[in-house]
Amino acid sequence: MNDDILHEIGATFAYGAVGIALMALGYLVVEVTTPGRLGKQIWTEANKGAALLLAVKLFSVGVIVTTAIVTSDSDLSDGLVDTAVFGGIGIVLMVIAFLLLDVMTPGKLGATLVDVDGTGKQIHPAGWVVAAADLGVAAIVAGAVS
């Protein structure tokens, strides 16, 4: 193997680690903003609202991380820092968007999103609004990065 391939393999693992860490942070954000244990709601109770929130959060973080990687300088350490910083900014902005929606809607938004009918088998329409907000924030941050 030549040095370029080894460098690219190392960079892939490094960016992957940063991306996975940011997605884990995104998971924690959903865990904190919704009542109950997220893992139990999704994997045991098959809660569709909780699954939607987590799926969109993870996808949105992935979009931001991907854009940061693609637009990063050729210097790996600078690129990793940029990726971590912009990924973190994206997550903070998603939290702010969620909190603003929470203030503008009746009740507690997190509880509404994961417990429509008491079974979690339906997705509350507000879930799609939060999903769109997350995707919108991801697009804004990705645009700012590029």
Image: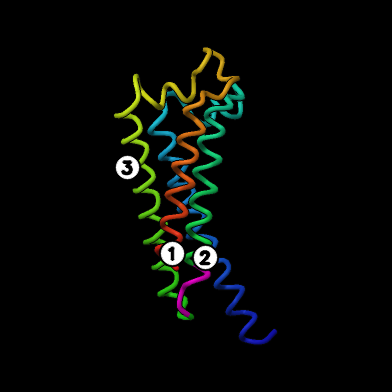
- Residue 67 image offset from top left, x and y in percent: 50, 64
In primary-sequence order, the first of circles 1 and 3 is: 1
Q: Is residue 52 above or below residue 68?
A: above
Magenta segment, which residues?
Answer: 69-73
Q: Which residue is mark 3?
A: 96
- Residue 112 image offset from top left, x and y in percent: 44, 21
Label 1 vs label 3, nearer the camera: 3
Residues at circles 2 and 1 in contact by the CB criterion of under 8 Å: yes
Q: CA distance from mark 2 to mark 1?
A: 8 Å
- Looking at the magenta stretch, what is its main secondary structure? helix
In primary-sequence order, the first of circles 3 and 2 is: 2
The quadrant in which residue 49 appears is top right
Closer-to-camera residue (8/115): 115
Label 1 Cα crowd, 10 Å radius (few <14 / some 14-19 / many 20+):
many
Q: Which residue is mark 1?
A: 83
Q: Secondary structure at mark 2?
A: helix
Q: Is residue 132 above or below residue 67?
A: above
Q: Is residue 72 magenta?
A: yes
Q: Secondary structure at mark 1?
A: helix
- Farthest residue toward the right? 1
Amino acid type, label 1: Thr
Q: Which residue is mark 2?
A: 15
The residue that appears at 52% across and 67% down in the rendered structure is 14
In primary-sequence order, the first of circles 2 and 1 is: 2
The residue that appears at 48% across and 57% down in the rendered structure is 64
Label 2 Cα crowd, 10 Å radius (few <14 / some 14-19 / many 20+):
many
Q: CA distance from mark 3 to mark 2?
A: 26 Å
